[in-house]
Amino acid sequence: MSTFDLRSIITEEFQNEIQDSFAFATGFGVVFTDAEGNHIGPGGNFCRFCNKINETPEGAHYCSLSNKHAIELALAAKKPSIYICHAGLVNIEIPLIYENQCVGAITAGQVLCSEDNIYPEDEIASEINWLADPELASFYSEIEIMDRKKTEATTTALSNLTNYVIQKLAYSQIQEKLAKQSEALLKAEHQLKLAQLDALQKQVTPHFIFNVINSISRLLSLEEYDTAEQMLNSFSQMLRYTLSNMKMSVLLEEEINYIKNYLTIQKMRFGDCIDYQIECDQDILSLKIPFFSLQPLVENSIEHGLLPNQKGGKVYLCCKREIDRIIITIEDSGSGMPEEQLQFIRSTLLSPQLTQSQHVGLQNCYRRFLLMFEEKFEFSITSTVNCGTTITISIATL
């Protein structure tokens, strides 16, 4: 049994945000469980059939047993478990592993599969006939039928989401340790660690995750399976990069590959509203830069430059070597900004404290480049209303 209680690790607000957003995006019922399979809270988007069963002690008991069996199967197989629960519905079980212990799981499903005999049936499924109850039989007829591809794509998305949850757990623990050690750290080192941590926590937001999942779900419903698979592959590569990387610095090539996956997804989501071009001199791909320091700048170009612009626009990322320096440029043809807003942004970059404004990502990137390259680093931002914004990063090489 786990020595950690999931209820003490994640907040109710965070739990509800994950459950409700994922349920809305996919149409599946979603709930967190403890390591014994017991539901934590009411869950999101539960069907009337499952709600009615869980209202009774007997039904809640059988649901817990089903969940626990599925958690055990997933742990043994080291992969998500897709199974038929005690009440005959398709469920997905993803264990939450924290410090080598199962602290609980995310359960999704409460649907029927369009194909028979695809997934294993829980061994307790035959112990009780829920459909003998006329009301439950009526509720059962309302349950949505999902095809196999959508179910399995949802499983992959849920697995990625589970990794995100574990990431949040791990980083909250790191933050506590940093707070305890802060007096013993040198000021610059402490700032760098906190800035790195802040970047890690902000790298893939729940908002972006659920927008992607919703897009994948929509593509599947339209039977655009190849496009859905491409989006899912790009999304999985993004999460692998962010979840496997606890280094202070990465190769420029790694960061660019991450940006390519991000832009691929956004292009598929917004179509002709977004265009992009990436150019990079081959001999500088091995340059080490702060981890997750360019993508937020590209994301700002999309979110604050192109999308507010009715006609959309283009993002251009260029990395090139000059005689005595390396120049990285992020340029967009979006809505731009007035001079007073530009001056405010420039002033926030010089602030000793991280602001709580929408420009915190920009400030964070600036600070980490400055801490890494010191006097070799130069930064400029220019913008013209209705023409776009350009950010230029210069790193001296001599």
Image (cartoon, rainbow, N blue to C red):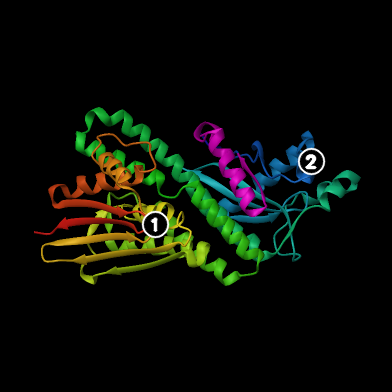
In this rendered view, identify the residue nearer to me: 158 or 74: 158
**Dot placed on the residue nearer the N-terminal end, 1 or 2:** 2
Q: Residue at x 69, y 41 (%)?
A: 64
**Residue 115 quadrant:** bottom right
Whole-percent x and y of residue 110?
72, 50
Q: Residue at x 83, y 46 (%)?
A: 128
Q: Residue at x 40, y 45 (%)?
A: 202
- Marks 1 and 2, how far apart in space? 41 Å
Whole-percent x and y of residue 168?
45, 42
In this rendered view, identify the residue nearer to me: 218 or 348: 348
In this rendered view, identify the residue nearer to me: 269 or 186: 269
What are the residue bounds of the magenta stretch?
A: 4-33
Task: Name the residue tied to disc 2.
Answer: 53
Task: Name the residue tied to disc 1.
Answer: 241
Q: Residue at x 55, y 35 (%)?
A: 13
Can residue 255 be found in the magenta stretch?
no
What is the crowding at mark 1: few (fewer than 14 residues within 10 Å), some, or many (at least 20)? some
Q: Up-down: is 316 above or below 370? A: below
Q: How many marks?
A: 2
* Secondary element type, mark 1: helix
Left/right placement of residue 136 relative to residue 354 reads right
Whole-percent x and y of residue 159?
54, 54
Left/right placement of residue 147 relative to residue 267 reads right
